[in-house]
Amino acid sequence: MIEKSTASIIQQHALNAIESLHNALTVSIDQCSVDEFELIRRGVGTAIGDIQMDLLELVYRQYPELNQLKK
């Protein structure tokens, strides 16, 4: 079992990664072709989904109180 302090650190890094990916998508909106933007959007969406399902869900199963969306 992951210690709660470690789980909290993992959560923060995962949320920071999601924020960075979102920012990458945002800056690409008007800076590339529609086709390129769709590829970036799909990649960002896949990466965020993986972070949510593989990292954050592990943390939240062990420490549901860390999930701020459940409050």
Image: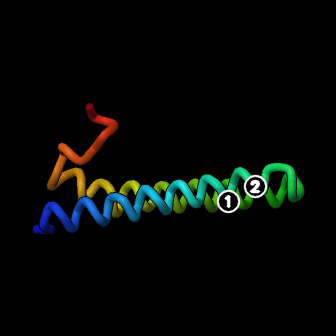
Residue count near mark 1 (Cα–Cα under 10 Å), binned few <14, some 14–19, many ≥20: some
Kindly indicate whether the residue at mark 2 contacts the one at mark 1 (C-beta within 8 angstroms).
Answer: yes
* Above or below 64: residue 71: above
Q: State the quadrant of the C terminus.
A: top left
Residue count near mark 2 (Cα–Cα under 10 Å), binned few <14, some 14–19, many ≥20: few
* Residue 30 point in image, percent of width and height: 86, 50
- The CA distance from mark 1 to mark 2 is 5 Å
Q: State the quadrant of the N terminus.
A: bottom left
- Secondary structure beneath dot 2 equals helix
* Residue 37 point in image, percent of width and height: 78, 55
* Residue at 29%, 54% in the rendered image: 57
Horizontal side of residue 51 vs 45, given as left or right: left
* Residue at 69%, 54% in the rendered image: 25
* Above or below 71: residue 29: below
| Residue behind mark 1 | 24
Amino acid type, residue under disc 2 in the picture: Val
- Secondary structure beneath dot 1 equals helix
Question: Which of the numbered marks, if any, corresponds to residue 41?
Answer: none
* Residue at 89%, 56% in the rendered image: 33
Horizontal side of residue 51 vs 29, given as left or right: left
Amino acid type, residue under disc 1 in the picture: Ala
Instruction: Classify residue 65 by image quadrant.
Output: top left
* Residue 52 point in image, percent of width and height: 40, 55
Horizontal side of residue 44 vs 52, given as left or right: right
Horizontal side of residue 44 vs 25, given as left or right: left
| Residue behind mark 2 | 27
* Residue at 16%, 51% in the rendered image: 63
